[in-house]
Image: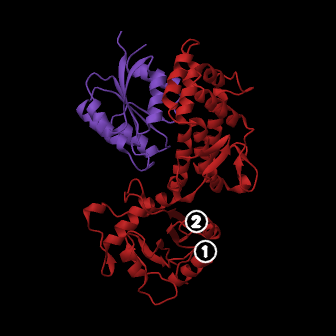
Amino acid sequence: MAKAKILIIDDLPEYLNSLRRALENDFEIVVATSFDEAKGKMSKELSLLLVDICLDESRPGIDRGGIEVLRWSKKNYPAIPVVMMSAYRDFDAAVDCLNSGAEKFLRKPIDVWQLKEELKSLTKQS
Amino acid sequence: MRNYEMRRYLLLTGYAGMDSWGSCATKASELPSGFAYSKPYELADYYVVFVNLPSEGRTSDEFFEKLFKKIGIELRQDEVVIFAHGAHTKHNVGSKDEDFYKLSVQGDLCYHLFATGFAHDRQHYFPFWLINAINNCLQGDGINWNSPKYGTIPSWDEIQVEARKRPRGLSVLKHRLGHVFLSLRTDCAGIIRSGEHERLEYARKVIEEHQVEQNYYLRLLADYQFFVLGKKDFELLTKITTHCTDTDLPDDYTIRKLLGDETFSWKLFLVKQTNNGEIDLESDVVKFLVALNDALEKRDEKIMVDVICGKKIPNFGGEQFIAWIRATDKALEKTIG
């Protein structure tokens, strides 16, 4: 069976690489560090998006570029589930994400094994 | 005797030259007094007062006591919210927490120390958005809040809620410290939970990514020390320089400054209890990072797997490293929220 394809969007390349290493045995991983790059990698073939809320590390707690990605994705690819993540304990942001159609909101640091299970469940892999 | 009618006051404190402060500063200079403060301007069901500080102006509790008296604020009866520019070592103008300790217990007062230079965005950085909005709505003898750009006039409830939020700088610092070891933490968990045969391949990929930077894991330690102590370099086998700069320390905060010397958890944050503070090279976490760095320099995935699986440092491996990160995070959460 083909692996589910997941696009991870985060502006921290090192973190993207470590997530890719942790997940690539079970999923096909594609990464992007910005909204523009993500747009170029979006397709109906994707099984899920994993998006960090802050896509500009120089403005942590202020930048919410990830929510723009979420809204854009829900408008253009409504069938693809989106999991949001954030290092901030930001209740408003979490509510914003869920109201905008996100399937899950996870707080960083994320336990990679728990993440793997969540992703398997959302992409219907057993 | 006539009953005292409770009033609500919003005080905005800034300094000449501060971004978005022009009209507020002008209003604050119109009263002929030693204190540069404005008359109270009515907005919704509260009054706004502008306080303009000189270029070297540091406030104190005494300053605010005198100011309240001049304005006519009765701290035991009125409700007061202050948004004040936070003084820090790089720009020592404005207020510090200690200016409000005494006043906060005397009446219904809450304050918020803001920093400039952030987006004027109501949702994400309310204090500076508010100053910018009011500055632009000051017209003639009133605050003419008629631009759709600013939406509704902030209610007193909204102002109080925003004022009680912790200064943003503290959570940014916690966020940045948390990011130093975020990838390593993920790699540790990945290697530990992989099957026996997959671990070496996993470690090989880690080495492949990080081998381009000499002393990568020691540099992470230097970055960590920088956020904890604000020191740029530390001696460890060779001189390691952090990739961080002063601008990465929000509002000039370090973890040590934030927690204060008295409550500083020296051991937890790897720091030796000395006046200057320095990384404790005997701590297990440091030994762990030095061993990982050694594996990386030798490009030896077997050593890396052994270090992470706890076979190199007695009673310490990736699991304990993750537990240590959790403990520091918890300690900061307790203070910062």
Q: Is residue B323 visible?
A: no
Q: Is residue A11 visible?
A: yes
**Of residues B301 and A77, the one drawn nearer to the viewer in this rendering:** B301
Q: Secondary structure beneath disc 2?
A: loop
Q: Return the x and y of residue B239 as percentages of the image width and height.
A: 63, 45
User: What subunit carries mark 2?
Assistant: B
For the point 39% across and 48% down, the residue is A63
**Of residues A38 and B236, the one drawn nearer to the viewer in this rendering:** B236
User: What subunit carries mark 1?
Assistant: B
Q: Label 2, on which residue? A: B89
For the point 62% across and 53% down, the residue is B231
Q: How many marks?
A: 2
User: Could you tell me the amino acid type at mark 1?
Assistant: Ser
1 vs 2, front mark: 2
Question: As drawn, is A75 to the left or to the right of B269?
Answer: left
Q: Secondary structure beneath disc 1?
A: loop
Kindly give the residue lying farthest to the left in the view shown.
A76
Q: Which chain is red?
A: B
- The mark found on residue B60 in the picture is 1
> Of the residues under marks 1 and 2, which one precedes in the sequence?
1
